[in-house]
Image (tube, rainbow, N blue to C red):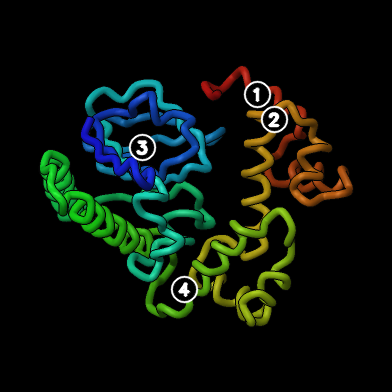
Amino acid sequence: MNRYTNREIGAHIAMARGFPKEFVDSGRYMMFLWNDGAQVISLYIDDRKIELEPYHLLCTTYLHKVHIDKFGENLRSLFFNREFYCVHTYDSEVSCNGLLFFGSNSSPVLKLDQDETRRLKTLFSVLEEEFSVADANQEEMLRILLKRLIIRCTRLAKDQILKSNENQSDIDLIRSFNVLVEEHFKTKKSVGEYAELMYKSPKTITNIFSKYSEDSPLRVIHNRVIMEAKRMLFYTDKTAKEVGYELGYSDPAQFSKLFKNHTGMTTTEFKNQKDQLPLG
């Protein structure tokens, strides 16, 4: 494994073959997981099973728990923490926030064609070389290369996740909405509340989402609530009532109905799956 650490500020970036145990359940790292082999890799992001096809790349965050049974030498992984590069603070540099990370598709999977695969292999090779250069410019060089990777993946995400990417202001609105949902999903549950924060009308936001996204803005809000609910039901001993209350639902029946409508099962049925999935 290649790694760089700046202990003064706690900045860390690492690149490895496989998925090192020290990064499992760390709760600190943004991740790129790339299958550059010929076999499918099965993995779980929380309760969601993903079949990572050859030459597909997955982006995920410190919010998620990742479990991979077998990957051999096919999986290449890159990890970095907020101290090394904060996608919130420097979104103007890479335009990934709310799309590549913290978007309505919480762990997007990107397909690489032959040209993108070649570019990514070259970029990973340059990164690997830079990890071995211990001088005053190493950290900044690694950060520049990481930004280049993020930008390339963001471009792919715009093409593959959104229906169109012709209007940058509309794309930025969707990204901003997704980021605000990430910040306020426990307290704000309606499109109107987010529209007020964005100084837009709910109709404007809904119309833009219908042009570019498979999900409606209300669905984005509900998806984020359900994702957090699943995590709390799996990884804590809290009751469904306690989970609902923490997520902003004073009426347990309202939360239970939302959960059942989105997952097709009750909170109890979902919690009972814990022993059936390789998580925790």
Between marks 3 and 1, how big is the CA–CA gap?
23 Å
What residue did someone put label 4 on? 172
Q: Are marks 4 and 2 in contact (CB under 8 Å)?
A: no
Between marks 4 and 2, how big is the CA–CA gap?
35 Å
Q: Along the line of sight, which residue is nearer the eye, 206 or 189?
A: 189
Q: Are marks 3 and 1 in contact (CB under 8 Å)?
A: no
Say which quadrant the N terminus sits in: top left
The vertical placement of 65 against 95, above or below, is: above
User: Which residue: 25% across, 40% down?
Assistant: 4
Task: Indicate the secondary structure of the residue bearing disc 3.
Answer: strand
Is any atom of residue 62 visible in this view?
yes
Q: Residue furthest front?
A: 8
What residue did someone put label 3 on? 52
Task: Indicate the secondary structure of the residue bearing disc 4.
Answer: helix
What residue did someone put label 2 on? 270
At which x and y percent is residue 15?
25, 37
Amino acid bearing label 4: Asp
Q: Which label is found at residue 273? A: 1
User: Which residue: 55% across, 76% down?
Assistant: 208
First in sequence: mark 3 vs mark 4: 3
User: Which residue: 22% across, 26% down?
Assistant: 73
133 horizontally vs 53: left or right: left
Image mark count:
4
